[in-house]
Amino acid sequence: MELFALDSDNRLRASALLLLLFFQMTGRVAGESGLYPLVVSTWPFLEAVERAWSAVNNGYSAVDSVVEGCSACEELRCDGTVGPGGSPDENGETTIDAMVMDGVTMEVGAVAAMRYIKDGIKAARLVMRHTKHTLLVGEKASAFSISMGLPGPTDLSSPESIEKWNKWKENNCQPNFWKNVVPVNSCGPYHSNGLLLVAETTCPGDDPRRAVELRSNHFGLHSHDTISMAVIDKFGYIAVGTSTNGATFKIPGRVGDGPIAGSSAYADSDIGACGATGDGDIMMRFLPCYQVVESMRLGMKPKDAAKDAISRIARKFPDFVGAIFAVNKNGTHAGACHGWTFQYSVRSPEMYRTEIFTVHP
């Protein structure tokens, strides 16, 4: 019998049953605010979010939309911590880390410590689409990217990054990321001071965490940061992407959490996604975004999953600085942070513009 042949009461019941069936098939829950498509990003990178939103709302895939969003941040040099022209290393050079992950196929493409190529997220997509690898690094990543059509080689430094580097050298190259070393002069080269490993020098009953020096002076909103973005497209497929030029004054060759799937970001279209930012050297030891998605798989709400992942790190490193956002497949989102106040941005069909959510430690 056709729906419109029913009387009004039965038609209403039939409509309700069809709506319930739709929610069950798509995994959505009636009354929830999250609707497809959806864009979530670390920090108030509004132009990047709007670029991704425009793409996904016009039918782009989740993967291509997240690349559009992160590319916008690279072009705009968001906070000087994404794209070229920021975060010089000890040699004054800017390098790029980036990653993209498809939450349907679980494919990942990433580049790390990449020199001379400004389009980090596009290079990461090329790795995912045209190789069977997950991560390419250094000058070989640059050569691959150029061979696949990206522009380069390009000097990724800027007058601002060079000025910052010169001031750092004038300050005797402080702060830096070395420990247990003796410098030949104020700015190195550095040599081991001959101390034994912590495990060999501590006495029974000593807390080994005392040997870990504080790192919070290295990290702040404008000294180290990542755009980490999640996109849910119109089909409910999820992708994540990240891009960063890493920690300011890092030791050349250092790779942070940006290109590491499960640390800076993670996606599974059956469950949801996560994005992270902060002290990547610490956070990558805990794979917080993998933890978040797996916690949601076990039934945790995004807010609880995010807090749990952050607390696991804080218990071991109480002075670390970092934050994450979590979003489930229904679009419900939340954030958690430690050591700073965190903001993340969201765009959904029910919003007239990108909205910023503030999370306190």
Image: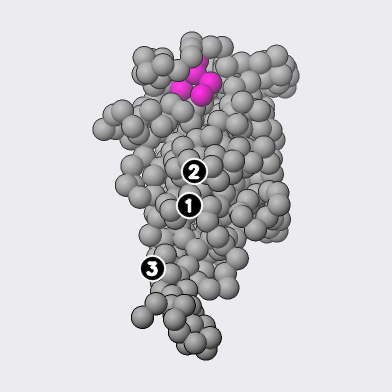
Question: SS class of the residue under badge 1?
Answer: loop
Q: Which residue is mark 2?
A: 59
Q: What residue is at 59 percent from the left and 22 percent from the top?
A: 84
Residue 253: x percent and y percent?
46, 24
Image quarter of the N terminus: bottom left
For the residues labelled 2 and 1, say whether their Cβ atoms are less than 8 Å apart: yes
Nearest to N terminus: mark 2 or mark 1: 2
Residue 187: x percent and y percent?
61, 18
Q: What residue is at 36 percent from the left and 29 percent from the top?
A: 127
Specify whether 38 is left or right of 237. right
Q: Which residues are magenta?
A: 114-119
The kind of residue on which mark 1 rests is Lys
The kind of residue on which mark 3 rests is Met
The span from disc 2 to disc 3 (Cα, nearest Å) is: 21 Å
Residue 214: x percent and y percent?
61, 44
Q: Residues within 10 Å of mark 2 (few under 14, many from 20)?
A: some
Question: SS class of the residue under badge 2?
Answer: loop
Specify whether 218 is left or right of 210. right
Residue 227: x percent and y percent?
58, 39
- Residue 234's label in the rendered image is 1
Q: Which residue is mark 3?
A: 25
The span from disc 2 to disc 1 (Cα, nearest Å) is: 7 Å
Q: Is residue 118 magenta?
A: yes
Question: SS class of the residue under badge 3?
Answer: helix
User: Foreground: 127 or 174?
Assistant: 127
| Residue 203 visible at all | no
In this rendering, the count of numbered labels is 3
